[in-house]
């Protein structure tokens, strides 16, 4: 019943120990992804105080079932709750659900916690849970997680405050979907009263939504009736949108904000060297890639795609793109610690320019001049694109880069007018099934890549509908071996992503799933 | 309509004497003209012959990133480990090209439209001036994103876009002066003598509106260098790894605190260019203006 | 005068209608789908289609146009596709903030630039003129984001005099509000002052060489009086024209300054609207900016006539 998506290795804990002792994390382009934590809270938490949170993006809206980016998640998750969530060790635990899991191959059961109340005082019922799940499933909602409910045939109340979901086939990764921050549980009565959930929030979370002034602030106050005894410790959180990176980091360093999300890589050294600040990050989830339009020549030729894969020294790319704040991906995309991690693949794509050139020769395209599109809107995408461009040049691939503004770029990739693109995002959830989106012919990304490989489809389907963990581990290793052969896309580097806070901000843990749930445990030691 | 008097109406009284060829030769020898001219020509030549002059390949990420100025890399290296000096040398191509190209376009369109509106009045005036109001009403970002959608992103189109954005400024400046001059005695005299409108505009009106145009040109040239990088996020302007002075400054911003050299060197070059352009503008105006020469 | 204003106001209606139409059509031809920006990265094509329908952007363009224009005329600019908020009220509050910042920074730059420009012209080619012109060039060559960032690092971090705090309305806390206003207005004023100084110097020189000024000087009038009585009034016209242009441009063009100083203004709203293809927001903001720009131009033209009686408004 319990799954441990990213089990911390002994190495991980040692790192934490060292960090707690030294207080400063020296970044390096180490070959392995790292999880770093702020120092472990030793003291007993103190209640009280309001935390000022410097937010990197003013949330576009609060719609609970449609993703509006990481910044707004840190607001929404404090007002709403999910059925499952993560503990500080990144293990799945129940939240609104006390117990959860598969009771047979096609039935997933949730036992809903009793005595939970919404911020308006009404009680959470099984009907609210069913309503929320149905809302996600309803195509009119256009929910981010809707497609993961495709195999669900029925959602019904069971005995003893339970909800049963019936599936066509088992879906091993389903728990992760319920723990995802776009799977909030809402009050049916509240939604049906005609409120606009884009503008207001009302849930069962640790904080109550008070007020929003666009571009200025979002104010949350402590929920005194939160279902977890003693939490939250803070009296409230005030979010201040500070879209300018320098301004946000300056505000943190000068003490006008207590906590700031998204530390740009240019400031990571400054922040880690500041004795008053703590940086909490991972170099696992965020990753970049060079993608293809498989229907276009010459990248329809697997040799050309392989040349791209071999033609980049990822180690160098981490240095040039992020000054070492990241990690190279030389094997499979599944990180160490996750089911399906393939240790044997490590080092497959170490940057072999000669091999890349001979592959181009085989394809009859040496040297290769090719157009590549990327976006200027996010530096975490633009920088790896420029680093990749420089690396590929060594391998005889002259990529002419065109930077477009975000939505134009999205449209361009969708229309498939460029043979290659450079993009980046994050691992969606802690199960290898996340690869479906990129490599299964029905996946949204795979469709944009025009990638379609029946063998790959079969493997991914096998993995998704298999229940035996050991078998799944093998299947996903095989998926990655296959990916190294047919090259649906070329993943390049992982980037460090994290938050920074004053030393007196205690109790927060950065999770590699980027789920900010541990914010509810924050207390101020001052 | 109101007149936009950039030169005082009394200025119209002075004669726009036909200039002798030798005058330019004299003017060019004046240090106030000669020095900026030499500096600007040098900058242009350096840009043109960049491949011969630059010590390194401006695209190569060869050295350690963010090196301070030193022996191997005179001006240090940037955040990708590229030689700053080489990039600065190459950057002049885009920056000077875009800046001169777009301002020339804006000046030609602006002067033509402004003269027509101010001289002929009536319908041309209404259409042109209210049209310029319209153009000014669209925020730059909206205009730019729309024009990228129609024209596609490229340096040539960037020149067109900046040119269009700056045209109303020139129109307004020229229009005001032309309005006043259209009624001036010497212009009427020329009409009586049967001179064609084109001839009157180019020989009598235009020379008298050159002063404010000079200021406008020298101000706009500087702005255009910065606007180039401001619009590069739309795919306009120099695309990586091509450098421009503007994009060197904007990419230096996150490193400002720890590596100020990334910001300082391109700023100096832009500052010098703008200073020289303005000095040249001032110098030429002063030296070429018959009234002013008399007053000194 | 009244006739002139009436005529220009009638023209204004036509111009604004034209702007509204152009911006409406333009936006729909720009690539990028609002539905995609609402839904994020992993949305499927079916979800996009559903969202397009929900947002009403799958209807014929002319139908959307008529609806929007009809409401806009009644002062209802609709609700934002992305945030679900009422656009008219968001624009109203942000317009106030923008206008405040622009007016203060422009006044500040006039206070700096007019006397300095005059001095530079009077002391032409002397040390003070060269020094002032060089400083102005420096101001011109430093983009706002550099000046702004330097100010934030110095005042916010190093000296901690003006920390990056949360925006407060003047009514809620006047002192805090004024403190917030200082750095962004200085940032904007530096660039503007440089431009105005250049224009002031040039037009002052132009006037100084006129016959009547020479006559006044020849009559032995005190220099300060000559400047005050005869030249300033005549020299200021191009400056007025320039200020008009700056005000219009700043309203939608100071995103970076607004972001660096967390100033909730119109430019940021416009920018986020453009980036997310929030059609009604962009249409609304452009409409407001167009009206203000055209009115500013009318005011500029009237100012000419007030400053120079020889100019007739027709």
Image (cartoon, grey):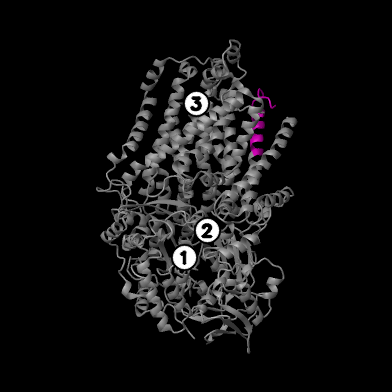
> Residue B88 appears at what percent x and percent y?
35, 43
> Do badges 2 and 1 share one subunit?
yes
Which residue is more in the foreground, A87 or A369? A369
Residue at left 59%, top 38%?
B135
> Residue B266 appears at what percent x and percent y?
38, 43
Label 2 marks which chain's residue?
A
For residue A69, above or below residue C57: below
Whether label 2 touches label 3, CB < 8 Å: no
The residue that disc 1 covers is: A446
Residue at left 69%, top 78%?
A122
Disc 2 to disc 1, how far (Cα)?
Answer: 35 Å
> Residue A392 appears at what percent x and percent y?
33, 56
Disc 1 element: helix
Whether label 2 touches label 1, CB < 8 Å: no
The residue that disc 2 covers is: A242
Disc 2 to disc 3, how far (Cα)?
Answer: 46 Å
Label 1 marks which chain's residue?
A
Residue stretch in magenta: C294-314
* Sequence-first tag of 2 and 1: 2
> Do badges 3 and 1 share one subunit?
no
Residue B58 as seen in the image, left or right of residue C204? left
Q: Is residue A281 rendered magenta in the image?
A: no
Residue C122 is marked as 3
Label 3 marks which chain's residue?
C
The mark closer to the camera, 3 or 1, is: 1
Which residue is more in the foreground, C71 or A233? C71
The mark closer to the camera, 2 or 3, is: 2
For residue B220, above or below residue A130: above
Disc 3 element: helix
The mark closer to the camera, 2 or 1, is: 1
Magenta region's main secondary structure? Answer: helix
């Amino acid at each position: 019943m319990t799954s441990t998506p990213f089990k911390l290795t002994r190495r991980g804990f040692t790192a934490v120990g060292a960090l707690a002792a030294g207080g400063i994390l020296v970044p390096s382009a180490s070959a392995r992804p790292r999880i770093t934590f702020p120092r472990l809270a030793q003291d007993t938490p103190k209640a009280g105080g309001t935390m000022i949170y410097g937010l990197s993006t003013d949330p576009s809206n609060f719609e609970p079932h449609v993703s509006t980016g990481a910044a707004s998640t840190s607001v929404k998750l404090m007002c709403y709750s999910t059925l499952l969530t993560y503990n500080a060790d990144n293990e799945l635990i129940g939240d609104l659900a006390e117990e959860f899991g598969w009771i047979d191959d096609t039935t997933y059961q949730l036992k809903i916690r009793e005595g939970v109340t919404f911020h308006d005082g009404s009680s959470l019922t099984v009907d609210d849970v069913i309503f929320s799940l149905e809302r996600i499933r309803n195509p009119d909602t256009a929910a981010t997680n809707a497609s993961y409910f495709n195999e669900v045939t029925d959602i019904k109340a069971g005995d003893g405050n339970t909800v049963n979901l019936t599936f066509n086939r088992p879906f091993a990764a389903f728990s992760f979907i319920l723990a995802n921050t776009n799977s909030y549980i809402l009050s049916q009565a509240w939604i049906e009263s005609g409120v606009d959930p884009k503008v207001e929030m009302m849930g069962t979370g640790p904080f109550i939504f008070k007020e929003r002034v666009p571009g200025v602030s979002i104010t949350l106050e402590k929920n005194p009736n939160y279902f977890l005894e003693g939490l939250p410790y803070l009296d409230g959180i005030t979010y201040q949108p500070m879209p300018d990176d320098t301004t946000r980091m300056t505000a943190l360093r000068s003490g006008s904000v207590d906590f700031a999300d998204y530390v740009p890589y240019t400031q990571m050294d400054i922040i880690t060297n500041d004795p008053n600040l703590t940086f909490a990050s991972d170099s696992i989830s965020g990753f970049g890639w060079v993608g293809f339009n498989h229907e276009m020549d010459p990248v329809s030729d697997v040799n050309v795609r392989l040349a791209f894969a071999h033609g980049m020294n990822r180690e160098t790319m981490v240095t040039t793109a992020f000054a070492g704040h990241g990690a190279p991906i030389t094997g499979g995309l599944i990180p160490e610690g996750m089911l399906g991690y393939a240790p044997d693949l490590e080092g497959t794509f170490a940057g072999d320019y000669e091999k890349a050139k001979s592959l181009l020769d085989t394809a009859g395209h040496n040297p290769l001049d090719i157009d590549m599109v990327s976006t200027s809107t996010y530096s975490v995408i633009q920088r790896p694109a420029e680093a990749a461009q420089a690396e590929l040049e060594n391998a005889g691939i002259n990529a002419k880069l065109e930077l477009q503004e975000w939505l134009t770029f999205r449209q361009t990739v969708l229309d498939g007018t460029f043979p290659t693109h450079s993009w980046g995002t994050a691992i969606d959830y802690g199960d290898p099934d996340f690869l479906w989106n990129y490599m299964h012919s029905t996946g949204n990304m795979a469709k944009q890549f025009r990638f379609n490989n029946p063998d790959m489809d079969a493997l991914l389907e096998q993995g998704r509908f298999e229940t035996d963990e050991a078998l799944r581990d093998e299947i996903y290793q095989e998926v990655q071996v296959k990916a190294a052969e047919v090259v649906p896309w070329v993943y390049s580097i992982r980037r460090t992503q994290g938050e920074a806070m004053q030393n007196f901000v205690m109790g927060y843990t950065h999770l590699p799933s980027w789920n900010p749930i541990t914010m509810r445990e924050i207390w101020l030691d001052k | 309509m109101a007149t936009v008097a950039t030169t005082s109406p009394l200025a119209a009284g002075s004669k726009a004497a036909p200039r002798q060829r030798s005058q330019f030769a004299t003017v060019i020898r004046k240090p106030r003209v000669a020095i900026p001219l030499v500096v600007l020509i040098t900058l242009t030549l350096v840009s043109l012959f960049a491949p011969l002059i630059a010590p390194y390949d401006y695209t190569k990420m060869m050295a350690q990133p963010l090196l301070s100025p030193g022996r191997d890399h005179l001006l240090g290296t940037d955040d990708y480990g590229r030689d700053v000096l080489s990039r600065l040398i190459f950057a002049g191509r885009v920056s000077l090209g875009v800046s001169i190209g777009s301002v020339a376009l804006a000046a030609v369109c602006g002067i033509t439209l402004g003269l027509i509106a101010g001289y002929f009045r009536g319908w041309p005036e209404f259409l042109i001036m209210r049209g310029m109001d319209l153009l000014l009403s669209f925020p730059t970002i909206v205009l730019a994103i729309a024009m990228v959608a129609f024209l596609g992103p490229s340096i040539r189109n960037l020149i067109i876009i900046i040119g269009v954005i700056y045209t109303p400024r020139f129109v307004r400046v020229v229009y005001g002066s032309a309005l006043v001059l259209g009624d001036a005695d010497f212009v009427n005299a020329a009409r009586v003598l049967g001179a064609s409108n084109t001839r009157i505009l180019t020989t009598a009106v235009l020379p008298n509106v050159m002063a404010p145009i000079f200021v406008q040109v020298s101000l706009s040239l500087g702005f255009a260098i910065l606007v180039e990088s401001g619009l590069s996020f739309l795919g306009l302007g120099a695309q990586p790894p091509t450098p421009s002075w503007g994009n060197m400054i904007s990419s230096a911003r996150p490193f400002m605190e720890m590596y100020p050299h990334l910001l300082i060197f391109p700023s100096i070059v832009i500052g010098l260019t703008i200073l020289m352009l303005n000095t040249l503008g001032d110098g030429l105006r002063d030296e070429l203006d018959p009234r002013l020469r008399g007053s000194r | 005068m009244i006739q002139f204003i009436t005529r220009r106001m009638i023209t204004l209606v036509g111009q604004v209608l034209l702007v509204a139409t152009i911006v409406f059509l333009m936006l729909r031809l720009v690539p990028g789908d609002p539905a995609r920006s609402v839904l994020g990265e992993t949305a499927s094509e079916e979800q996009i289609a559903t969202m397009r329908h929900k947002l009403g952007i799958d209807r014929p363009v002319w139908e959307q146009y008529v609806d929007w224009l009809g409401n806009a005329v009644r002062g209802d600019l609709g609700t934002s596709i992305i945030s679900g908020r009422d656009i008219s009220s968001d624009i109203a509050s942000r317009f106030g903030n923008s206008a405040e910042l622009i007016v203060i920074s422009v006044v500040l730059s006039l206070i700096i630039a007019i006397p300095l420009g005059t001095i530079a012209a009077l002391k032409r080619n002397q040390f003070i003129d060269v020094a002032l012109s060089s400083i102005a060039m420096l101001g011109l060559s430093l983009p706002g984001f550099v000046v702004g960032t330097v100010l934030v690092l110095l005042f916010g971090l190093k000296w901690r005099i003006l920390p990056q705090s949360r925006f407060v309305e003047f009514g809620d806390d006047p002192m805090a509000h004024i403190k917030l206003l200082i750095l962004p207005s200085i940032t904007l004023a530096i660039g503007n002052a440089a431009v105005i100084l250049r224009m002031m110097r040039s037009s002052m020189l132009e006037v100084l060489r006129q016959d009547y000024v020479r006559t006044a000087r020849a009559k032995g009038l005190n220099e300060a009086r000559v400047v005050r009585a005869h030249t300033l009034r005549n020299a200021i016209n191009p400056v007025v024209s320039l200020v008009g242009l700056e005000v219009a441009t700043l309203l939608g063009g100071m995103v970076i300054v607004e972001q660096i100083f967390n100033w909730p203004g119109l430019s940021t709203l416009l920018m986020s609207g453009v980036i997310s293809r929030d059609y009604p927001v962009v249409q609304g903001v452009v409409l407001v900016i167009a009206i203000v720009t055209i009115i500013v131009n009318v005011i500029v033209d009237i100012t000419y006539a007030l400053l120079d009686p020889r100019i007739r408004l027709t």
